[in-house]
Image (spheres, rainbow, N blue to C red):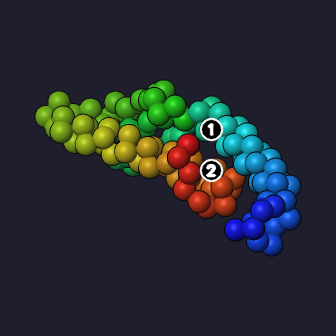
Amino acid sequence: MAKGGFRGLPGGGGGNMGQLLQQAQKMQQAAQRAQEEIKQTTIEATSGGGAVKVVLGGDREIKELKINPEAVDPNDVEMLEDMIVAACNEAQRKLEEYSEAKMSGITGGMKMPF
């Protein structure tokens, strides 16, 4: 390689590198803002035709669990357990979709480690 930088890039392309670093910093700041927005959001999911409702925070903690009293059958506890698990799983799936959509707007669809 000739002295003075990369072929076709005067002086090694320092100006381009500076722009690239600025873009990376802007992307990182936007990603941090999006992560904060995600943490502040809540996702609601139901199962059993609304018999069980779960509200999941963006921090992945269950904020609320509501069970319709009519869904409580002492002779069929397994059904209630299944509805709770289904509602929790649905809320997590919705949060993941929301998070991916929020972050892909920043990263242009590239999967990033944040």
What's under tag 2, amino acid-wise?
Met
Q: Is 81 in front, or is 111?
A: 111
Q: Residue furthest front?
A: 3
Residue at (72%, 48%) from the top-left corner? Answer: 24
CB of mark 2 within 8 Å of CB of mark 1? yes
Q: Is 51 in front, or is 31?
A: 31
Kindly identify which residue carries mark 1: 35
In the rendered view, tell whether residue 23 sits above or below residue 28.
Answer: below
| Quadrant placement of the C terminus | top right
Kindly identify which residue carries mark 2: 103
Q: Is residue 9 left or right of residue 85?
A: right
Residue at (37%, 45%) from the top-left corner? Answer: 89
Answer few, some or many: residues within 10 Å of disc 2's Cα (few below 14, many 20 plus, some between 14 and 19): many
What's under tag 1, amino acid-wise?
Gln
Q: Secondary structure at mark 1?
A: helix
The earlier-in-sequence mark between 2 and 1 is 1
Q: Position of residue 109 (x, y in %)?
A: 61, 61
Alpha carbon separation for disc pair 2 and 1: 8 Å
In the rendered view, tell whether residue 103 sits above or below residue 34.
Answer: below
Q: Position of residue 108 (x, y in %)?
A: 67, 61
